Every structure is written in structure tokens, then in C-alpha cells.
Image (cartoon, helix red, strand yellow):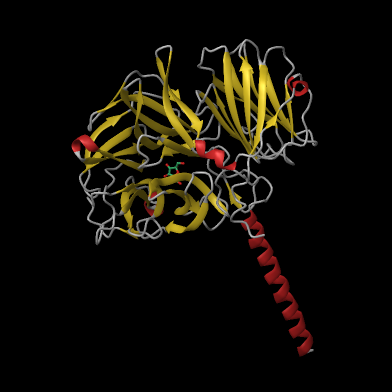
Amino acid sequence: MKKLAQVVLLFAAVLFSRVVHAQIADTEKYDEPYRLQVHFSPRAHWVNDPNGMVYFKHTYHLFFQYYPGGKNWGPMHWGHAVSTDLVHWQELPIALYPDSLGYIFSGSAVVDSNNTTGFGKDGIVPLVAIFTHHDPKGEQTGKDNFQNQSLAYSLDEGLTWTKYSCNPVLKNPGIRDFRDPKVCWFAPAKKWVMTLATKDKVTFYSSPDLKSWTKESEFGKKTGAHGGVWECPDMFKLTLDGKVYWILSVNMNPGGPNGGSATQYFIGQFNGTTFTPIDDKTRWLDYGPDEYAGVTWSNTGKRILFLGWMSNWSYAGQVPTNKWRNAMTSPRQLSLKNIDSNLLLCSNLVQEFDHIKQKEITIGSKVLAGQVMKGLPHQYLLKLRASMAHSFSVTFSNASNNQLVFGYNKSTNQYYVDRSRSGKIDFNPDFGKVSYAPRFSRASISDIKVLFDASSIEVFADKGLSTMTSVYFAGRPFDQLQISRQKGGVSVAKIIPLKSIWRQYAIK
Ligand code: FRU
């Protein structure tokens, strides 16, 4: 009897280890249903905002709001991933854990080249993270000052982090929403400037050493969209026709142009103390429902690189993935354009996507005339040239009759993404809604790029002037495409298959 029990135990142990091993191997392959193949998502568990994005020693760091205990939002940590080309990502151990001051909410990171903090030792340049400590107990007991700003630093190029012993460095004056510090170096005054989301406005602070902060000014109480709470602000410079502009971006939830979360921005000047907008228009960086909490990388010089969380607080906790939940958008390079005296941001896929391009497939005249094209790869770039004298649409579909439609409606002059029949949509009543983006360009032709992945579509129309990001959850991959038959419409279409970014890390 004893022998039999031993055999059974041994058998169970072997079986258990196989199951565990199979699960790990599976996760490492990044090939589960809906797993994005050309976007960053964590191996497992919950992710929201990108944090601490900084470029240092040929490496792009991406930290992110992360809950390693499950696939729902929970006590926030900073997860960590690195890339040398913005396209291939390697996930590293968690960088920051919650502590006695609270959860680690969103924030930024800078290269402290002049060692203003004094954290650098023996000539080592410190990386410094500035983040919000969110004290859940304070929140529960109804206090107003449970969000405070703190520091952590790294002396080994971002691998390990030490929290500053005198945290927090910027104490809450009694504002319940007091978070998401984004810091940049303001060279003319040799000081650090922080943009902080303070409920319904951005508050500017400055500091010589990242440790002591002085309030400079506030912006936005009466400007911009106010359908929700302001979160994750950012400020950076762009040049147009030889003139420098400061862009102040602010995320807001809810109240986005297509419901829920979205990123608005203002164009203006910043003098080290105050931000003065050129006008009081509300502009949106991405009209799709699934770009949120987007901010730019620090220390990339004149190249301004932006990345958002590819989800929406309306349903981020309900999307039907297993193991992990949510992901990041593609990284985009931002620029300014003048359209009929209206300045606008353009978002374009970073050129590093060329690294994963495969042999181009030209779409023939029969497909341009409406024939369904089958057997397509599961992740690709679709390039379209369309005459804007007519409406047109492109339908991505599978043999199960799920479909996702991207199109242009001439009568309203809007682009749209319709995911109402795209597969699983019933986890939230808002998910199936069609989303719309205005067309800003007046050109008669539009060059459009669509980045198509296993559960997301990103549209960059008119060279990035109208941008839309949407996720979808099809029953099986969309391997078919159909272009509407209207005369005129799409005249050139190419598909550029993309290699999965995960294969190099996958366990075979
Ligand atoms: C934005 C946000 C931030 C906050 C973080 C918490 O999505 O609400 O304001 O720091 O997420 O995870």
C-alpha cells in the first residue's frame, strides 16, 4: 500500500512539473490567442500606463504600471522592459515594489548627467525615477493627501533601483488627484521642470536637484476638455518652420472623443514658469478608443518618441485575454504640421519597424476591384493610397464571419473603425461602438498606413495627421481582406508582413 502511494505521488509530481513547465514554455512563446506579435505586452499579468521612459546608453527603457499578482489592476509596481530598437522588447525583473509609503503609481525617469541629485558615485551618472507614491490606507480613510511624489535612482543603467531615503520629495497640499510627475531639464534656467496632474489642471513645479520643489504655475482649469480627471501630463519641444513650440499633452479619463480615456494636447510657449497656449482649441493626439496615458521618452534629443497604453479604462479590466491583460501601442515619432493655419501633431510609426519587415505583397487589380484576398499573414503593415473624392472601406475578416472595418466617409469627412462585428465584444456595452476621427488634411489623395496585429489596429492617415488605435478580439485570426468596390477610392495597396518580435526570446 505504501509503495502504491509512493508511485502515485511520484506520478503526480511528474505530471505537475510537466504542466508547470508547459505553462512557462507557452508563455515564453508569446503565442497565446490574441497575443500581439509586434507590440510590447508583459509575459503575464496586468499592465497599464507606460512609465519612466528614458533612453540611456543605446537602450530604451520602458517601465510600466504592473500588478504581478493577477490580471486585474492591483497594488502597483513598476515592471521593466528594455529595447535597443523600440521594436524588440525584453522583459526584466520588476524595478519598483510598493512600500510603506504606498503603491508605485505613474511617473518618469531622467538621466541626471550633472549629478544634481548627488546620487551618482565615482563618476557614475545616475538614472532617477520620479513617481507617485499612492497610499491606499490614506485613500480609504478619506484623507486628501494620499498621493505624494518620490524618487528612486539606479547606478547600474536601470537594472536595479534604490528608493531615496527622504521620500516623499513633493508633499501633497490636499488635492486628491495629485500624481504622475513627468520631469524634463529646462536648460535656459538650469533647472528641472515637473508637470504634475492635479485633478482638473496641470501644475508646474521646478527644482535644482529633483529633491526640493517649488510651485511655478497652473494651467488648464478653463482650457481644454474636462469630461474627466486629468492624468499623466507631459511637455516637450518641437520645431516647425524654424520656430520652436512647446507641446503640453494631458491624458484624461473619461471624456475622450470616442468615449472613455484619451490624450489631448496644447501647443504654446513655456518660459520656465508658465505655459501660454497659442489658442484654446482642444486637440486629440489619437482619436481611437485605445491609446491612453501616452507620454514621450526622455533623453532622445530632437527626436520626440511617444508610446501609450493600448487600452481604455472603460473596459481594460474586462478584455478577454488569459495570463496577461493589456499592452502598449506602437512607438511613434511626433512632429508638427500646419494645416490652414491650424497647428497639429502628426504621429508616425518609428522607422525602426523596418527591422522586422518581410517581402512586400502587392495587391492586384482584382482585389482593388473588390475581390476578397485570402491567406494573409497575421501581422503586417498595410499601405494604402486613396482618392479622397469618395468614401472607401477596408474589411479585415476571417472564415468565422468576424470582421473589422476601417474606412473613410466622404459625406462627414471622417475616418472610422468599426469593430461591432469583430468577435468578442459583449464583455462591455461600449466596446462595439464605432469610433471616428476627423480628417484634417485637404489633399485630394491620402497616404495611409495601418499597423495590423493579432488584436489591434493602428491607423495613421494623411501621414499621421489623423490617428486611431483600436483593439479587437476575433475568434480566429483575420487572414482575409476586402477593399470596397467604389470607383476611385483605393488605388494602391501593399501589404508588408512583419516578423514577430518575440521569436528571438521564445523557447523552442
Ligand atoms: C492613468 C492612471 C494614473 C495613475 C495610474 C495608476 O491610467 O490612473 O493617473 O498613476 O494609472 O495605475
Task: Name the quadrant of the C terminus.
Answer: bottom right
Viewer-nearest residue: 47 or 187: 187
- Where 280 sits versus 82, above or below? above
Viewer-nearest residue: 312 or 492: 492
What residue is at 38 percent from the left and 36 percent from the top?
233
Q: Residue 458 location in percent, x, y?
A: 58, 32
362 left or right, relative to 148? right
The answer to whether residue 475 shows anywhere in this view is: yes
- Where 254 sits versus 484, above or below? below
Q: Residue 108 location in percent, x, y?
A: 37, 45
Q: Give the image quarter of residue 475.
A: top right
The answer to whether residue 226 shows anywhere in this view is: no
As drawn, the residue found furthest toward the front would be: 359
369 left or right, relative to 144? right
Task: Name the quadrant of the N terminus.
Answer: bottom right
323 left or right, relative to 214? right
Q: Residue 275 location in percent, x, y?
A: 28, 28
What residue is at 27 percent from the left and 48 percent from the top?
171
Viewer-nearest residue: 122 or 428: 122
| Ligand 1 - quadrant of the structure image | top left
- Numbered label tally: 0
Q: Give the image quarter of residue 483.
A: top right
